[in-house]
Image (tube, helix red, strand yellow):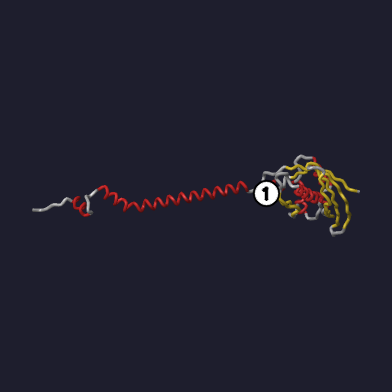
């Protein structure tokens, strides 16, 4: 007589208890996938931690950016590229007074300059017109001056150097300037020394185009000009 055993009963007896298919499946699932789940949970935790750190860092940068203050630094150059003044622009009170004086200082030098160097003379004239308000009385006055005594023609026989003595404000927009002009022959000999005084009115219109920023970075324009020789 053959004795047959029930498979489930045999497995159950092997574990010392009755076989439970649910527990067996759960045990196998834990062994196979439990480690994967734990690893995924750890990765999620690290990702969340990294996101929190990134948010804190970004918040700190934004906080610093709101507290930072950028102060523009302006350099005034003459027509030959020489620095005549430099400093931080005061945005609260407009263009710094020293920079306005420096602009007028360089402008008078270029306006009255006479040189035998045609390129330097052209640059000086361009610099003068870059600081004249379009359609202003000053523009008409300077144009008449150049037509009546063209510096290019004078430069063929003589030169004129300029020494600005003072640039004094009469108000926020008007200035009185005194300078000395020394006329030389082409060999360097002094032909004459003359003292001049002029009155000038300016307007400030900060440039927004890159081309104008290069020509007149401070946006200082002469609107009225007049001068006379001091006897």
Where residue 100 sits: x, y (%)?
76, 47
Q: Give the camera-side residue of 105 and 45.
A: 45
Residue ID at (29%, 51%) = 27
Residue ID at (75%, 49%) = 99
* Label 1 Cα crowd, 10 Å radius (few <14 / some 14-19 / many 20+): few
> What SS does tag 1 mark?
loop
- Residue at numbered disc 1: 71
Residue ID at (37%, 51%) = 37
Q: Is residue 67 left or right of residue 222?
A: left
Where residue 80 sits: x, y (%)?
75, 54
Where residue 47 sits: x, y (%)?
45, 50
Q: Is residue 59 left or right of residue 175?
A: left
Q: Give the camera-side residue of 182 and 89.
A: 89
Extreme residue toward the front, this view: 16
Residue ID at (60%, 48%) = 65
Q: How many marks?
A: 1
Would you identify the image quadrant in which residue 184 lies?
bottom right
Where residue 94 sits: x, y (%)?
73, 44
Extreme residue toward the right, this view: 231
Q: Is residue 14 left or right of residue 107?
A: left
Q: Give the camera-side residue of 32 and 81.
A: 32
Extreme residue toward the bottom, this view: 187
């Amino acid at each position: 007589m053959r004795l047959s055993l029930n498979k489930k009963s045999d497995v159950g007896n092997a574990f010392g208890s009755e076989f439970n298919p649910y527990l067996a499946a759960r045990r196998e699932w834990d062994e196979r996938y439990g480690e994967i789940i734990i690893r995924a949970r750890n990765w999620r935790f690290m990702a969340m931690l990294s996101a929190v750190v990134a948010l804190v860092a970004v918040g700190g940068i934004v906080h610093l950016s709101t507290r930072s203050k950028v102060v523009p630094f302006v350099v005034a150059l003459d027509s030959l590229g020489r620095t005549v003044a430099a400093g931080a622009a005061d945005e609260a009170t407009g263009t710094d007074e020293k920079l306005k004086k420096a602009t007028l200082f360089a402008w008078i030098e270029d306006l009255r300059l006479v040189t035998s160097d045609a390129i330097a003379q052209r640059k000086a004239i361009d610099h003068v017109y870059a600081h004249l308000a379009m359609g202003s009385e000053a523009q008409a006055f300077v144009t008449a001056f150049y037509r009546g005594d063209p510096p290019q023609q004078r430069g063929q026989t003589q030169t004129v150097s300029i020494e600005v003595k003072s640039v004094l404000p009469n108000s926020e927009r008007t200035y009185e300037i005194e300078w000395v002009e020394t006329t030389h022959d082409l060999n360097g000999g002094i032909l004459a020394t003359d003292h001049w005084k002029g009155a000038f009115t300016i307007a400030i219109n900060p440039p927004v185009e890159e081309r104008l920023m290069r020509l007149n970075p401070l946006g200082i324009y002469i609107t009225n000009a007049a001068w006379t020789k001091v006897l």
